[in-house]
Amino acid sequence: MTRVPIVLPLAYLILVDGPLFWMMILMVLIVATDYFDGRIARWSKTVSEWGKVLDPMADKMAGGLVVTALAIRGALPLWLLGVIAVRDLSILVGGAIITKRTGVVLMSVLSGKIAVTALAITVLAALLRADPPVLEACIWGTTALLAWSFVRYVLRFVKVYRHGTEAIKTRS
């Protein structure tokens, strides 16, 4: 939950085109809290059902606010924000359906983590005002990875919906 209060000033600084130094400091803090939260939970064997829900929610909120601020400022296209919103809301709804049906909260899939990493690189490129061809490549690469991860989530949803969580015990 530490990420949520950190992302609010970051989004504000993006909107007002504030100092890049402070934006970078806040981004490093957000990434660090995400990284260490997961590492500590796994290391201490304290991964919880609640944590499996809160962590991706905090990621989605942080990413959504930052991309929204960049889209409002014109640094990223509005359609990318739409792609992210539709994907993330669909994943949340699908996850809620699976949790209600099976009583199990599924963890994120690797392709989702890769897509979010690509999004972070795109955000960084936008903040650093990368040359247009570089930013364009980041945007389209991120869009492709978001689509790929969404397909993976849909396939997992269908498999678990039909066969229960036993169907994904060996792979997700």
Image: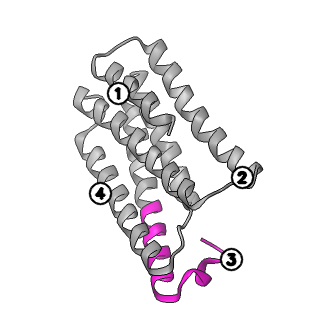
Q: Height in image: 88 above or below 28?
A: below
Asked if the residue under mark 3 is in contact with the one under mark 2, i.e. CB atoms within 8 Å, the reply is: no
Q: Can you give x and y, in whole percent of width and height, for residue 85 in the image?
A: 30, 51
Q: Which residue is mark 3?
A: 170
Report the amino acid beneath label 2: Arg
Of callouts 2 and 4, which one flags the residue occurring earlier in the amino acid sequence? 2
* Residues tagged 4 and 3 counted as in contact (Cβ below 8 A): no
Q: Percent x, y for residue 138?
A: 43, 39
In screen coordinates, is 25 left or right of 97? right
Mark 2 crowdedness (10 Å alpha carbons): few <14, some 14-19, many ≥20: few
Tell me the magenta residue range: 149-172
Pair 2/4: label in front: 2
Residue displayed at 49% across by 23% down: 26
- Callout 4: helix, strand or loop? helix
Eye-nearest disc, 2 or 3 = 2
Real-space Cα distance between discs 2 and 3? 19 Å
